[in-house]
Amino acid sequence: MSTEVTDATFEETVLKSDKPVLVDFWAPWCGPCRMVSPIVDQIAEENTEKLKVVKVNTDENLETASKYGITSIPALYVFKDGEVAKSIIGARPKPALEDELSDFI
Amino acid sequence: MTDTQLVIIGSGPAGYTAAVYAARANLSPVVIAGSVTAGGELMNTTDVENYPGFPAGVQGPELMESMREQAEKFGAEVIYDDVATLKLEPGAHQIETALGARYTAQAVILATGSAYRELNLPNEKKLSGHGVSWCATCDGFFFRNQHIAVVGGGDSALEEATFLTRFASKVTLIHRRQELRASQAMQDRAAADEKLEYLLDSEVTEIHGEDSLTGLTVRNTVSGETAELPVTGLFVAIGSDPRTSLFADQLSLRSDGYLNVEGRTSKTAVEGVFAAGDVIDSVYRQAITAAGSGCSAALDAEHYLADLDAVTKQAEAVAAEASQAPAPIAS
């Protein structure tokens, strides 16, 4: 299971990370988020060297979600050196996600 | 490679109902449910009030979980993967998944459902996830106290519109005709909703915004006049198209793009291949009609497999008899 990050810990954990960070923006009421979550976990486990993977519950951390203009979830954002380096909106099968994340894994 | 009697592709009401029936008939069906689409369209809905047996209504995802559980209880195997290739070869249809699993199946039930239709306007893709959305239950929350537009005039459009008034300051329903297609019950509920406004005889012609949606241009289809609508959210619910890309080149499709089946059966043009649910239904498109057609497909597949079994046994018996009989005398 990947780390849950909050509005309070986002800067420290994500923006100041040495490694690229994949952030899974989700919410408990979002069906597609539940479907993609285990796939994100698998990608996290298989790429621990290269990529840090965290989750942001947008229901409880609206500040971070709105700062990055999240209006559709699941939204998977990769942050590199504090900047958004990639954004993927909507649930995708594992091979398609790996393909989109190929620069980082 | 796993050899099976029956593979069911899809896991909406059609796929899971087919799985319940097939599993109870001891066909040990394998359901390839989809890695992120398992449960089908009802996974993105909230209250389902017209599925018989639930007088208090049921949550879409809960209903689908129950169907899955019921199918698994009788021995269906549910795989969370996507079909990458399907080769229809009577007797041993070949299925390969995105994660590389391979199956042969004596019979296949196609219950691939449908995919949301897009407006096909410039900026629609670019602003997808930045104001343009296809899932009100997922994304409505992000539009608190904002003005949202919903495009469409059917049940799903009205359901989304009334759901979104929980969050939005105002919801404008844009429909290209004067009459809505939605059921009377849904229209009555919408009429009672004070946050809901209608722009009828209207269509969206432009979507505006650089990083996020800032507004729409809407054209009146009768007068031709255009007007700007300053919304920050756009939910598109203009229907859906059957998902046939896996087999469009191997089976006969109707002129409207739906998969063709024989009369009231679930039989497609290829032996041992059956179809159910929204992929064959351009008319009713309800959870309960999909479930019913999943049942038909399972029964058709069951009869087909029983006949196949009888033919095989008969052929074996003939062969066994022939091997015991004295060699024919050459004439």
Image: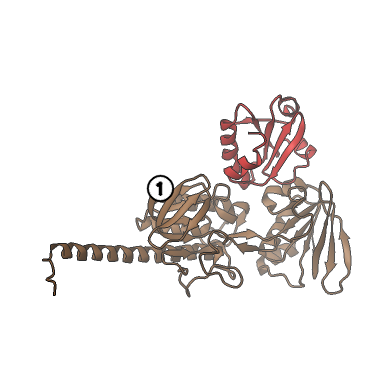
Chain colours: A red, B brown
* Residue B302, image quadrant: bottom left
Direction from residue B93 to residue A54 in the image, left or right: right
Q: Which residue is mark 1?
A: B1
Residue occupying the point 51% across, 60% down:
B111
Direction from residue B44 to residue B139 in the image, left or right: right
The amino acid marked with disc number 1 is: Met
Direction from residue B133 to residue B246 in the image, left or right: left
B38 and B242: which one is in front? B242
* Residue B191, image quadrant: bottom right
Which residue reaches farthest front? B331
Q: Position of residue B14 (x, y in %)?
A: 50, 60
Q: Position of residue B69 (x, y in %)?
A: 46, 49
In the rendered view, would you say B171 is above or below A98?
below
Q: Position of residue A39 (x, y in %)?
A: 57, 39
Q: Position of residue B173 (x, y in %)?
A: 77, 62
Chain letter for mark 1, please.
B
The answer to whether residue B77 shows anywhere in this view is no
The answer to whether residue B329 shows anywhere in this view is yes
Q: SS class of the residue under badge 1? A: loop
Considering the image in quadrants, where does the C terminus of chain B appear?
bottom left
In the rendered view, would you say A63 is above or below B201?
above
In the rendered view, would you say B154 is above or below B149?
below
Label 1: how many residues lie within 10 Å, few (<14), some (14-19) or many (20+)? few
Report the number of discs. Answer: 1
B37 and B16: which one is in front? B37
Direction from residue B56 to residue B2 in the image, left or right: left
* Residue B23, image quadrant: bottom left
